[in-house]
Amino acid sequence: MNLPAADLRSDTVTRPTPAMLAAMFQAPVGDDVYGEDPTVRALEAETAARFGLEAGLFCPSGTMTNQIAIKAHTEPMSEVICEQTSHIYLWEVGGIAFHSGASVALLPGDRGRLTAAQVEAAIRPENVHYPITRLISLENTHNRGGGSCYALPELEALADVARRHHLPLHLDGARVFNALVATGQDGREYGRLFDTISVCLSKGLGAPVGSVLLGSKAFIEKCKRIRKVMGGGMRQAGYLAAAGLYALEHHVARLADDHRRAQQLADALAARPYVTEVLPVETNLVIFRLADTMPAEQFLAHLEQRGIRASSFGPQFIRFVTHLDIDDAMLARVEAALAEL
Ligand SMILES: Cc1ncc(COP(=O)(O)O)c(C=O)c1O
């Protein structure tokens, strides 16, 4: 019997469900560059409402929503404060320099999380030698931090620093719904704290494509022009937006299942003698370290032969990600494969 492979590389690998595809086929559409696509407008309004922000902008990717926001908040010779392993810095092709001509102040986080005191200390004083601090950017959940989440008081303290220094606060919320489900926080609390939020639909939510940038009406108007110059103005994008709307309605609460399965994987890994460290699991990402006696290539090849795929995440580090297309039967196969080694 040819069982489906368990693809644990990322939550971006999911395929639309039949019901999501049906919603996409039925979407009313129009030319979104003319502002005439009703499904895109509905998605932008619905996502904004969930976070209590005024407006949204549908874009092809989370990289684009982040980079548009950074460009709109900064100017050349200014600086963005962020964590040193944040996606905006590490995995967006140096886009902050390329698109915005801005510098970065990189801070070491606790599994990706920054403290208010750290951020406040990194704000540049007036001095002709320095770039001007223009933006504070956080990531929640934090990818490289193993899906770690901020507690609300920590976010409130960070937002307080931003306000006192008249700096905007951006959130890379590629997996913000994972954070909300794991902590029981409400998205509207985030709207009070953050000026702009990038929300991905194509990660845990299981849509094939798309992210929404959220902010004030005036900010999003400015961002529309930046999206256009980046080539991100899409036409009958409602077919894609329909998948996002469907995901918001049907795929948020179920993230708790992904989190439970990630914890189950972490427990199985912790019991294996060839695993030396498993980062605490808070959401759907499991990052672990293999003993030097178990080369990462050998471990990955063993899994691959059993139809299981995972990502290498630095020397001897591996990442497993649970998502919509991983079920309990697949999990049992992964656990069996781990026990064989
Ligand atoms: C934390 C984080 N931010 C942003 C992105 C970028 O999203 P995209 O792949 O849609 O450009 C990712 C992608 O995995 C991510 O993990």
Image: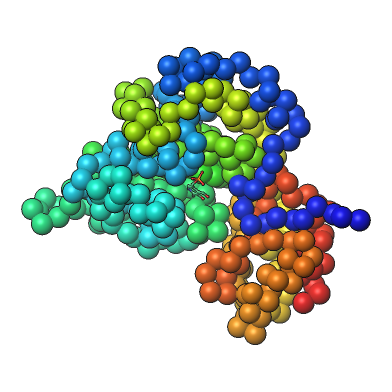
Rendered location of residue 118, percent (x, y) = 31, 57
Rendered location of residue 165, percent (x, y) = 23, 42
Q: Left or right? Give the position of 311 relative to 32.
A: right
Q: Residue at x 79, y 65 (%)?
A: 306
Report the front residue among 240 and 179: 240
Q: Left or right? Give the position of 28 relative to 229.
A: right
Rendered location of residue 267, percent (x, y) = 71, 65
- The scheme the figure's colours follow is rainbow
Quarter holding the C terminus? Answer: bottom right
Q: Residue at x 81, y 74 (%)?
A: 340
Rendered location of residue 131, percent (x, y) = 17, 52
Q: Is residue 197 above or below residue 57?
A: below
Question: Does the image show residue 41?
Answer: no
How many labels were placed on the picture? 0
Report the front residue among 293 and 284: 293
User: Residue 197's quadrant in the figure?
Assistant: top left
Q: Residue at x 70, y 55 (%)?
A: 7
User: Residue 178's quadrant in the figure?
Assistant: top right
Q: Is residue 46 above or below residue 119?
A: above
Question: Does the image show residue 29?
Answer: yes
